[in-house]
Amino acid sequence: MSPNLAYIDEISDNDIIFRNKLISIIKREFPVERNEFLSNYDTNQYIHAAENVHKLKHKINIFGLKKGFEIAINFENELNNEKFDSYQDFIVVLDLIDNYLKEI
Amino acid sequence: MLKCIIIDDEEMARTIIEQYCSKLDHIQIIKQFNNALEAIQFINSNDVDLVFLDIHMPELNGFDFIDSLNNPPNIILTTSDGNFALNAFEYKSIVDYLVKPIKLPRFIKAVTKIDATKESIQSVTNNEVNEMYVNIDRRLVKIHIPDIYLIEAKGDYINIKTETKNHIVHTTMRKIEDKLPDSLFLKIHRSFIINLKKIVDIEDNSVLIKKEVIPVSRSNRPELMNRLNLLN
């Protein structure tokens, strides 16, 4: 499971300016959404944490992480039922993206 | 040109939709919102043909947003999961449902549905202009408006004369006048409305419609002459 830019390249359609703009937005939005999730999770606000996961799902999908997307779907459902089995797996997915964003 | 707004709390999602719209000549993004509450006021005071609407938003979700509008425009829902698709069928204003990440061909397919809807509405409107229903003996009878050649006042009734049939209807000249297209009909006397296309000829103070000679009042004659000039 490794992130890629296939979708971003596809929608950019050789438009380098748009491609860079999109990556720049993701680099700015992802840490904010990730921190919001961690904050809500740590303070037991699980419904809000589920909303954060829902939003993060889009970015996980954008980077082609199919398995990561499935983990996020499960974890969102778990949070809505105050269950947390997928927490560690979800954190791994977030870390993967976090590291990838530092490389690109 | 379709005037559109985007409502999504994710800047990345808004940017992708904006990029797709920029590839289509007939779509103009007039405003973007990161929450639905701000968009309500804008929609209520501006012409908006289409809304790209995220379902999952804080404060007010997409469905609550639609419920809050008196007359919702066309809406294309955007969401990260397909679980809400069934709910979407309950809203007439929802034209399509796009699951993120959205791909361009699917986006174009959704927008094309709006074009088809607009054409359909136009078609219905045209039909409405060409037809009207009159109440005769508790039945609503359809009349093809261009077939009417003369309307004559008869006390509390009017006689609507068409190519095939006459209809005696209990109503006033004022009411029927409001239902007729100005481009086709003209009141030439307090008791007569004529279809300008059906005029055979005109004498000083009368017109010949089919085989009927209809008086033209002095006050209505200038307007009649003007309108005839327009028909040339």
Image (cartoon, rainbow, N blue to C red):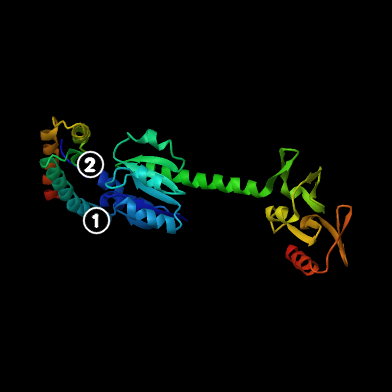
Q: Nearer the viewer, mark 2 or mark 1?
A: 2
- Is B224 left or right of A82, judged from the image as shown? right
Is residue A100 shown to the viewer in this render?
Answer: no
Q: State the SS at label 1.
A: helix
**Residue extending furthest toward the front:** B156
Which residue does the image show at 26% across and 57% down from the upper left? Answer: A17
State the image quarter where residue B105 is shown: top left
* Viewer-closest of B146 and B116: B146
Pointer 2 local density, CA inside 10 Å: few below 14, some 14–19, many at least 20: many
x, y (%) of residue A25?
22, 53
User: Between A31 and A24, which is closer to the camera in this rendering?
Assistant: A31
What residue is rendered at 12% in x and 45% in y? A39
Q: Is residue A11 left or right of residue B90?
A: left
Q: What residue type is labelled 2?
A: Glu
Q: Are marks 2 and 1 in contact (CB under 8 Å)?
A: no
Residue at point 41% right, 55% down?
Answer: B43
Q: In this view, does B136 lie above or below B190?
A: above
In the foreground, A20 or B156: B156
* Disc sitting over residue A51 in the figure: 2
Q: Which residue is drawn at 22% across and 41% down?
A: A51
In-image side of B49 versus B133 (left or right): left
**Mark 2 or 1, nearer chain start:** 1
Question: Given the image, what chain letter belongs to the residue carrying mark 2?
Answer: A
What amino acid is found at the position of numbered circle 1 in the picture? Lys
The label on residue A91 is none
Residue pointed to by mark 1 = A21
Rendered-image quadrant of the C terminus of chain B: bottom right
- Residue B100: image x %, image y %? 30, 41
